[in-house]
Image (spheres, grey):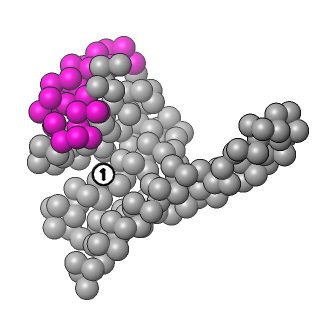
Amino acid sequence: AAFNLGIAHARVGNYRDAEAIQRPALDMLRRSFRAGDYRLDAALTALAFTLAGLNRIDEADLLLTEAIAAETKAGRENGPLVTVAIEQRAEIMIRRGDMASGETALRSAIARREAAITESHAVLQAIRPRLIALAPEQGAQLPASDLLADTELAHTLARLAQLELRAG
């Protein structure tokens, strides 16, 4: 719960308050869980976002690298947390002036998001008839796709377009 409060602070730009909450929470998670636990890896990624907001990009990059390695070792190399971490690392690369690496990372994130949308769309389409049969009113209200995944992909595509315009 405390970590969620830290994330909320970071999302509105209160990075110092966010770090003050997230840092002790991460220390507690490190004591409670082993590397590769999704909760710990999510906390690493969230704190990295906060640190990047404070322009401490080297420290943020280390946390993202740690989270990606742990998620990969745990067999979740294609999971959403790795995609988010790759996007954050792309932003760090761009801030460092390494546009080519940043673009490559953004393209990787886009491919991952597109694959996730395809997968979630297939799942939604497969369960829709069953849900309609069981609960017609609720089943008919299911979205045709995963709106959150669509929105995240659109955001990443927009960031890549900005990068291409800057380079062009």
Magenta portion: prevailing SS class: helix
**Which residue is drawn at the image coordinates 51% and 49% (left, top)?**
148
Q: Amino acid at mark 1?
A: Gln
Quadrant housing residue 62? top left
> Which quadrant holds the N terminus?
top left
Q: Residue furthest right?
A: 133
Q: Say what secondary structure mark 1 lies in.
A: helix
Res. 108 in view? no
Q: Which residue in the protein does label 1 denote?
A: 88
Instruction: Please state if 94 lies on the left or on the right of 164 as rendered.
Output: left
Res. 54 in view? yes
Instruction: Please state if 128 lies on the left or on the right of 121 as rendered.
Output: right
162 to 119, vertically: above or below: below
Please report the bounds of the magenta region as a residue range.
Answer: 6-33
Closer to us: 121 or 27: 121
Query: In the image, residue 85 lies at what x, y percent?
Result: 36, 47
Instruction: Please state if 72 lies on the left or on the right of 143 as rendered.
Output: left
